[in-house]
Image (spheres, grey):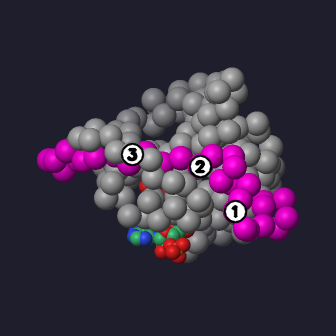
Amino acid sequence: MDEDEAATPYAARQRFWRGRDVAFTPVEPDDAELIHRWRADPVAAHEIGVWPGSLHELRERVEANAEDRHRDDFLVLLADGTPVGHIALIEEDFVDGTAEAYLLLAPEHRRKGIGADALEALTDLAFGELPLHRVEAVTHTDNAAALAVLSGAGFVREGVRRSSCLHRGRRHDSAVLGLLRAEWEALARPRSWEH
Ligand SMILES: CC(C)(COP(=O)(O)OP(=O)(O)OC[C@H]1O[C@@H](n2cnc3c(N)ncnc32)[C@H](O)[C@@H]1OP(=O)(O)O)[C@@H](O)C(=O)NCCC(=O)NCCS
């Protein structure tokens, strides 16, 4: 499938939120196949902290997530509608004002600035539209791409969960990062609604 074919069904999707070059559209059950492809290999699974399951299981999870009032899931779209990744605020707690960021890009769309754009847009949504106070992210300590993109969005490294995951025969540590509302407010960059 070339990029034009991939974009066609998505070009008409409602753009709920925008970043500099990307837009977010809510995940629908029929997106499960696309997301399943992105998270199917064990390396991607390790990067996002899940093990790849069946399409059937993922579709059920996507449907359940749509009903879950404690998370917001989006596909990341390019300007022409090409879907390039899945981004979400999960574990939203509107009493304590906390949530966790989730981001997975298709391998062929990495290292083009899309992750940075999308993560900034997600934090703008969390602090500019939702009354969150803290967004957390967890990734293993040798995920250089995730650590770079999180640090670029202002996330501060807070600690390490030692020996918290297994990959390719050895245990890995996970880094815990957080971005607080006051830190987001202090960032000297345009917000999503200013692009
Ligand atoms: C992590 C991820 C979202 C990054 O998105 P991306 O679009 O590839 O990153 P960008 O192109 O926006 O790069 C942002 C920064 O990270 C750096 N970076 C990106 N990939 C990198 C890599 N593999 N190694 C080192 N640095 C990297 C870029 O140089 C850039 O740094 P800069 O701001 O100093 O220029 C993407 O690699 C991905 O989906 N990975 C798999 C899932 C995952 O790990 N999710 C994170 C879980 S918290």
Question: Dot 1 lies on which element?
Answer: loop
**Residue 50 coordinates in the image, percent (x, y):** 38, 39
Q: CA distance from mark 2 to mark 3?
A: 13 Å
**Residue 34 versus residue 66: which sits nearer the camera?**
66
Q: Residue at x 78, y 61 (%)?
A: 191
Q: Quadrant of the C terminus?
A: bottom right
Q: Residue at x 74, y 55 (%)?
A: 185
Highlighted range, magenta: 167-195
- The residue sitting at the left extreme is 169
Q: Which residue is mark 3?
A: 159
Q: CA distance from mark 1 to mark 3?
A: 22 Å
Kind of residue at disc 3 = Gly
The reply, left or right, for residue 164 in relation to residue 85 is left
Q: Where's residue 120, x and y in %?
A: 66, 59
**Residue 194 lies in the magenta stretch:** yes
The residue that mark 1 highlights is: 187
Q: Earlier in the sequence, mark 2 or mark 3?
A: 3
- 105 within the magenta span: no
Res. 34 visible in picture:
no
